[in-house]
Amino acid sequence: MITLNDCINSDAQDPIARLRDQFALPDNVIYLDGNSLGAQPKSAAMRAQQVIQQEWGQNLIRSWNTAGWFDLPSRLGDLLAPLIGARPAELVVTDSTSINLFKTLAAALQIQAKKYPHKKKIVTERQNFPTDIYMIQGLTAWLESDYEIVLVDTTEQLTAAIDTETAVVLLTQVNYRSGEMLDMHSLTAHAHAQQALTIWDLCHSAGAVPVDLNGCKADMAVGCTYKYLNGGPGAPAYIWVAERHLADFAHPLSGWWGHATPFSMQDTFTPTATIRRALCGTQPVVSLALVESGLQIFQQTDMATLRKKSLALTDLFIQLMTEQCPSNDLTLITPRNHEARGSHVSYMHPHAYPLVQALIQRGIIGDYREPSVMRFGFTPLYTRFVDVWHAVAALRTILETQAYQLNAVRHTVT
Ligand SMILES: *Cc1c(COP(=O)(O)O)cnc(C)c1O
């Protein structure tokens, strides 16, 4: 049996325990939702003040040049690159994940249509995050072409579903609900053997698990910065295109920021040769600036160290749940084997929503996802081993005393 003392010892031996001090976390909260909205880096508050008071307030429009506003999407991309196995200058931080999905899918379909016009299948998972599926549906409906959307039901069926008719494979590496992680390397290799292109959604991967986009020879990738990367609510997302596709990468949102010379004000769109062709229009500078605060903390460690701690945290949670909450109503839906696990753990329970609400009332913040899933994110930068202990102890008490409201009010955001 694991004891509270074991958890205290694990924290004492944790080589990155001190990184938690860089986050503004309230004392009375155990935060297990960094997979949905990352905690606030303390430096973000100072940075926001600097951007608003100094750069905007005092320097006004000159800041596009003097404060590096214009270069921000590229500079942030360079900072993020090592976390996802990309090289500097291969990605930009801009727009939302949904919009970047649109751009990558449109560009990938066009590249494929020129080379392999017979390929009409777009393969994804039925369990994928809804916006990924919705964006495929929206774009293909608008194209009025005869694309076929293949929604694969289980991850085991993915390989067989990616066949010679497949144009594009759009997958999320770590599933938002179950926390299951796909094998990016083998699925990309299989897709390429079928002459299909891959788009990887890294929303639950970047900053949570090591990613090697170039090592896997992935084609394109997108992801958000407000989850494990701690960029702030609604922070801009990123878009990565493999260098070999860049010259052919054309998307329909051809705004002036993607132009080779935006301030030459020409009447014809000529895309820049760099990844900045993935930009559309003027960037949300205040939000964008705060992304840097989150990324700077990652520079003080590396993904191998973070992965080791993440697995230790999720292992501990699963083990403690087995020991302390032996309820037959609880079903673990996250893989037990490390290769297939991201950095969050999910359980199904018939009263999952009321249980999550009861936990939140006690200051233990996880979240709820349809259907009947309790989801707990373990952010290696700031989650402590004792946090895991106290979260399970609280859930045990709630379950044993049935201290939850079956008719708990459903909030808009669950
Ligand atoms: C969080 C998440 C998104 C969110 O997309 P937005 O456009 O930022 O709202 C998309 N895909 C996945 C897999 C996610 O987990």
Image (tube, rainbow, N blue to C red):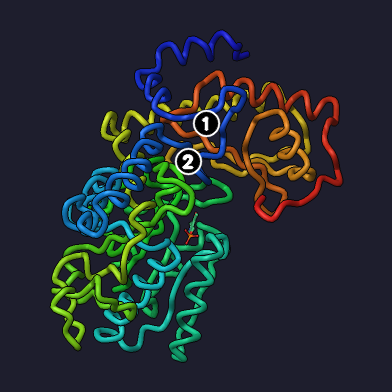
Q: Position of residue 299 (x, y in %)?
A: 26, 34
Q: Quadrant of the N terminus?
A: top right
- Point out residue 362 in the picture as x, y percentages from the top left corner: 71, 28
Q: Is residue 61 above or below residue 324?
A: below
Residue in the picture at 31% in, 52% down: 56
User: How far from the left and from the top, in percent, is residue 119?
Assistant: 36, 83
Asked whether, in this view, residue 40 is left or right of residue 115, the answer is right
Nearer to me, 347 or 132:
132
Quadrant of res 285 = bottom left
Q: Closer to the camera: disc 2 or disc 1? A: 2
Residue 101 lies in what quarter of the image?
bottom left
| Residue sitting farthest toward the front | 58
Q: Give the Cα separation between the discs numbered 2 and 1.
A: 17 Å
The residue at 54%/38% (across/down) is: 377
- Which residue is labeled 1 in the image? 314
Left/right of residue 127 with respect to residue 397 in the rendered view: left
**Residue depicted at 61% across the width and 11% down the height:** 3
Badge 1: how crowded within 10 Å, few (<14), some, or many (20+)? Answer: many
Nearest to N terminus: mark 2 or mark 1 = 2
| Element type where label 2 sits in the image | loop
